[in-house]
Image: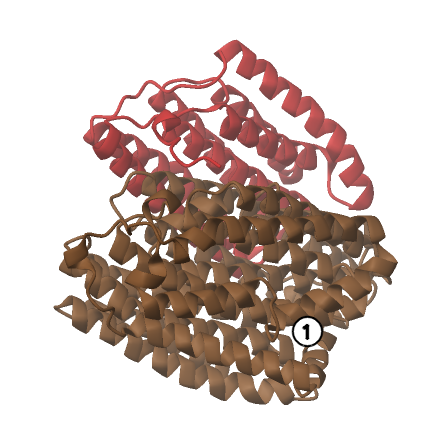
Amino acid sequence: MTATLLVCASFVSAFLPLRTRSVRAAVLMSLAGSTIVLALGLALAVPALVASASVASGLWYLDPLSGLLVLLIVFVGWTAAMASVSYLSAEARESVVSAQQVRHYGALSALFVCSMLVVVLANNLGLMWVALEATTLTTALLVAFYARPGSLEAAWKYLILCSTGIVLGLMGVMLVYAAATSAIGESGFAVLSYAALLHSAALPPALMRLAFAFVLVGFGTKVGLVPMHAWLPDAHSSAPSPVSGMLSGILLTTALFAVMRYKTLVDHALGSAGYTETLLLVFGALTTLVSALFILVQLDYKRLLAYSSIEHMGLTTFALGLGAPGAVVAVIHLVGHALAKPLLFYGAGNVLVRFKSTKFDRVWGVARVLPYTAGLFVFGLLALLAVPPSPLFVSELLLAAQAVAAHAYLFAVIAVALVLVFAGFARAFFPFLFSRDEAPIQAHELTNERWNSAHTAMTLHAVVLTGFGVALFAGYALPFIMHIAAALA
Amino acid sequence: MGPVFLSGACLVGAVLAAFLMASRMRLASLASLYAIQAMLLSAAVAFYAVAHGDASAYAVAGLTFVLKALLIPYWFVRIVRAHGSSERLVAYARPTTLSFGALFSVSFAGLIAQELARASSAPYVALASSIALILIGFLMLVSRRDMIGLGFGFLVVEAGVFALGLALTGGMPLFVELGALFDLSIFFVLLVAFARRAQREHASLATDYLRELIG
């Protein structure tokens, strides 16, 4: 009931900004809508996180893992709406966007959140697929939001590559359906019920193995796994910054969640996790290494953050290939990344509004021009680079401990990639933040930075991130995480 | 000739239409062939419905016919003409090379279908036809240099996956088919919106103008 209410509320909230007349009213209505969705999401997800059993009722399936994803989606959706207030108001003042565009932005953002909620709550693999494709369709226009060179190209690549990937994912769904109909002897919508498939009689291993390969390649395109990642840096760097935060923080996580659901089913059908884990380890290591190489040579700070998202998805995918302890690592890493990356994209939005460029060679000395933004941005960078007490420090430490013994060569690849990432971030962001050269802003423009809604959104992320990290170090959060990770077994 | 045989024959006909699409370089020709392919696919579903007495398959056949055989080709041609875009399409290879590529795709599909037929109880011809459609669609996606050709390439891949669903499972559940058709409609609307913007910005639908974002 609450799940239906949450999905309906997020859908209806898309219409709130459409009735407004000004930019200010449109962004505030979007924020009001996302606040209601946040409240409903908390009411649904918090009990699910501590529940001892999953709940399957008709269309919806709620276990601790989907509860966690709901929590992340509604929280990041809310902070993105908050960051959009200052970001879009500033762009509208400079006539970069019109009131009509802002209304559409609010509606599409809400539909995007709605489609992600359906993905993580769906009890039916068919419904999950439809909703995952809907995430592409709702965000394609947001990627093409600006009339800038490159926006159309990014949106076009996003539409064609992700839609093709999702169609390949549909082949995986079909193969699971074929396996289920042959095992159960029935057909129809209910056959694709996740809860029923989890407890169904032995599904044909050959079909399930093939299904996972298609799902990993198809949905993996949406996750940004190499070599299907080409759309991601373009789309994330071309979209408005709050949308980039949502794309990076929760869309990739949602797509990986869909892969996790299939992994559980396929492992159950095969009677062992060896097949899926091998594929995940290889894709994870390849994705981490290739993205690290691209991070090293980036000239654009939003693209660099996008490649960092690919790197973190690679690490999480790798962790998922490490068995039960790896599932704990993956959950910590997903939460840490989903909290840290939107913080950085909101900060990147403030920098873009002020410096009018996303190129490193046109932006430097940010700490002098935008001290609040820079302070919070540094916090986010340190968290992303796994500096304690970041949750990512805990996840990467646990990952190293697990991988060194079991897959030493692949871990060596991961270790090299992490060093490259650190070097790439230090090379790019040190002058960006702290260069003492004359800032590319005229002296009369160097007014004091005012606190805005994006700063509030960044602070909220920083507080939650710190709280989660401290809870992990103190040992309070680990039982919860293990409880959530058990849903992957 | 029973309805099952006719359903398989329609799928083979759809592959023939896709084979011809791979090398066509004019919008009207490509749209007509796509409409024929969609008609054959909806006929394949209808024959399947007759053979198995499946009422929901009739609905899927009807909707597929209306959306893919009538609306999409008609609107594609109409919108491109309304915006004065060139109806001459471009590719990285010559039509003869593309025809050989399509022929290779069909042969390769025959080999893959043998493996898949062993793992499932689906008919070989239907499996081979649907995989051939998917591979020809991918060939179009990698060989075309304009938004129209790429759009049709995606539509052929989607048609192949639709046919694979019919071959493997007798069609997906109605709700999933409706969801897929709805998503396809939105995809088409976005495709047209981006094509119109490209025509406005670059006075061309060629993807050669979409090469700024590298690295």
Residue B210: percent from left, percent from top: 37, 32
Report the residue at 27% width, 53% height from top: A355
Kind of residue at disc 1: Ala
Numbered circles on residues, count: 1
Which residue matches tag 1? Answer: A195
Tell whether A182 sits left or right of B48: right
Could you tell whether B61 is left or right of A450 in the image? Answer: right
**Can residue A156 be seen by looking at this rendering?**
yes
Q: Please name the residue shown 60% across and 83% down the image.
A: A470
Quarter of the image containing the C terminus of chain A? bottom right
Secondary element type, mark 1? helix
Residue B27 at x, y percent in the picture = 35, 23
Mark 1 burial class by Cα count in 10 Å: few <14, some 14-19, many 20+: many
**In the rendered image, is residue B169 in sight?**
no
Q: Is residue A116 left or right of residue A111?
A: right
Q: Looking at the picture, tell me which residue is in the foreground, B215 or A254.
A: B215
Q: Position of residue A234 (x, y in %)?
A: 43, 44
- In the rendered view, would you say B187 is above or below B12? below
Q: Which chain is red?
A: B
Q: Residue at x 55, y 87 (%)?
A: A46
What is the quadrant of residue B107 in the picture?
Answer: top right
The correct choice, above or below, for B122 with respect to A96 in the image is above
Quadrant of residue A157 in the image? top left
Residue occupying the far left of the picture: A21
- Colour treatment of the image: by chain
Location of residue B85 in the rendering, given as x and y in whole percent from the top left corner: 25, 26
Q: Chain of mark 1?
A: A
Chain identifier, colour brown:
A
Residue B119 higher or lower than B96, as above or below: below
Q: Nearer the viewer, residue B79 or A287?
A: A287
Residue in the foreground of this view, choosing between B14 and A28: A28
